[in-house]
Amino acid sequence: MKRLSWFNVTALTLGFAFLYLPMIILIVYSFNESRLVTVWAGFSTKWYGTLLQDQEFLDAAWVTVQVAFLSSTIATVLGTMAAHVIINAGRFPGRTLFSGMIYAPLVMPEVITGLSLLLLFIGLNIDRGIMTVVLAHTTFAMCYVSVVVSSRLATFDTALEEAARDLGATPFQAFRLVTLPIILPAVISGWLLAFTLSLDDLVIASFTTGPGATTLPIKIFSAVRLGVSPQINALSTLMIVVVTIGVITASLVTKRNAVRRAEEERAGAASA
Amino acid sequence: MSQNVFAPWADPTEKPLIQFKGVTKRFGDFTAIDDLTQDIYAKEFFALLGPSGCGKTTLMRMLAGFEKPTEGQILLGGQDLSQIPANQRSVNMMFQSYALFPHLTVWDNIAFGLKRAKQPKDKIEARVQEMLRLTRLEQFAKRKPHQISGGQRQRVALARSLARAPKLLLLDEPLGALDKKLREETQFELMDIQEKTGTTFIIVTHDQEEAMTVASRVAVMNHGQIVQVDTPDRIYEAPNSVYVAGFIGDVNLFRGMAQARDTTPPPAIDPVAQPLPEPTSPEAEKALNDQATRDARTPQPNALGMKLHDKLFAPVFGKWIDEPKALPMPDPIEKAKAEAARAPAPTPPASEVPQGGLDIAWAEGQPPLIAANGPETLSGHKVVLSLRPEKVSIWKERPTNQPNAVNILQGEVIDIAYLGNMSTYHVKLADGTMVKAQASNTRRIANRGITWEDKVWLSFTATAGVVLEDEA
């Protein structure tokens, strides 16, 4: 192992301190005995206990999970379809425009996305609730899914799908039996990414939500306005854990598959 | 050739399996296939040969159903293919990259097409087993494609495309990914399988050796058109254009002006009339002197000997040709050539140069090349004499006992490509033209007589080359 120079060590420390110090403080204080958030009074897990007693928080958590699950699933289906068309359908009129438009919401300010969706729902006279949040989350999560899936499809040999069709498969069968199993890891990591994004979204959710559909980030935000309680710290710590697991799983799936693919390609190249 | 040689294209009653009728395919401004009409018959092994970008892959993809012709029709067994999608055609394709499904085992890869055809399970089972046996893959059935070698993968791809028993199998550069030795083995395997299954094969390749080996007919393509369709031997020996001659194998091209030959008295080959080479260097001069002194030493025939010959040997060895004799050097190549030349026709007198044909004036101050097989209609045209290197003999001395070798050129060896079984000599003529001559290495390397910078003589017969109209 190469030893890092003092400069690199300093840069690394500062960089990661900047990124993670706030979260570490939050996690540490979630185990604080004291009611006062900024005064350390010994180790305790009592705030986690009170959190589990708090029906409002539990409701919000349930809403959030429902929204995240539904929106990420819909987003994955739509995003994968979009990526498949953009990458594999060849050149059709407007292809460049469409592929650009798929990625545009990634850089769109969330406030604008949220506001425009709110106006749409009001205009269509749709009652705001869980469904509207799901739809809103689907719209932006879909872009992320299609980015992840299309980067996998870019290296996918289209001859495989042609071979399937040549052997009697309809275009849909070719996709379901050949393309999908091969790109599945990318689809799963796209889903996990969408799930994570939906879980922690505040801005878009607060524009599109309605009575009885308070998500956890909204709940936390409004609770903090009344004063930070150690209970919030505990909740936030749990959320960090969930998100971390999601992100790590997604990257492991991608990584493992990339390694296997490299092996397969090496095997393929050996004969080429 | 046997009586029942496979040649359905020569039989007017035979119905073609595939018919291209005025097929044109354009991609934007680019014309990939240009008004192509061609019939292909059942059980043929048809090779599409051409450089990359000549349209051969497009042609194949149209047959498979991945591209639609812009104009014209493709018929399969009399049925228009244009309305039949790829998955409903009785056409299967073996892809260049094999396109094996990496997530499925060898067994499932082969069964894929059968399952789509909704066949009963036991039938699928039996058919896959049959295919595995045909391609000798039984013990690899449970492996994934990345767990087997390149040659095995190639066979899986073949088994998979044959499993549905298509009327037509398309092979897109099927052997491109294999090394040379494996490729040659596989070529024979392909021919064997094609014969066993009786399927019509169309193979796309840019490897002319491969096309010649496997195919019953070869179509040479260029710029979206088929330039020539013929059996491999006809393509090689009787190319219809300079393009085909140059594309298939090695070739020497002599450009010149054609003129019909005198058909009445066949010109006696008088070697003295042929201009002697100008001695260009002291070495060459010395070599010439050496030859002269040796000629003087060589025993010349006397009257008694001639009489004896006329009486006793003439029926066997032919008429006495009175010309200064020089015994050929005991050069192995020369000897082999001389023996080969003498063996089939022991009595070829000098006057047996075929009549008719063309004289080709190809260089200033050189005698015209005689092409007795040249069509007289080309007289007065610019022509190209296309000559295969193996039809050019190479000699260390001027060949005098080769009455058939009416075309004789002199030059200097610039390069020798030793290929093991034979050598190719690159000979530079006086006017700078490079000519390739091939000789079999019938002796071990130590005995080879001709080396770099040697002055050599090249000869070929009056019918060795093919006269083509000059396109340039």
Image (cartoon, grey):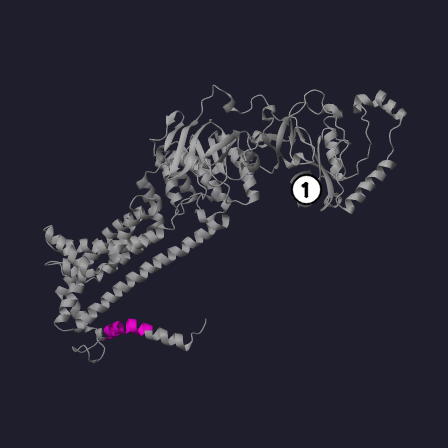
User: Counting other residues with Cα less than 10 Å from the Cα at mark 1, is it few (<14), some (14-19), or many (20 or more)?
Assistant: many
- Corner quadrant of residue B110: top left
Please report, as a chain letter, where disc 1 is located: B
Q: Give the range drawn in magenta.
A: A15-28
Tell how many labels.
1
Question: Magenta stretch: residue A16 in it?
Answer: yes
Task: Please report the residue visible at 36 percent of the width from the left and 74 percent of the height from the top.
Answer: A11
How far from the left and from the top, in percent, is residue A95? 30, 47
Q: Residue furthest top?
A: B13
- Tell me, yes or no, whether the highlighted magenta stretch contains residue A13: no
What type of secondary structure mainly makes up the magenta span?
Answer: helix
From what the image shows, is residue B224 above or below residue B303? below
The answer to whether B302 is drawn above or below residue A98 in the figure is: above
Q: In which quarter of the image is residue B317?
A: top right
Q: Which of B460 and B267 is in front in this view?
A: B267
Please state the horizontal and vertical placement of residue A53, each as a whole percent of the image.
14, 67
The residue that mark 1 highlights is: B427
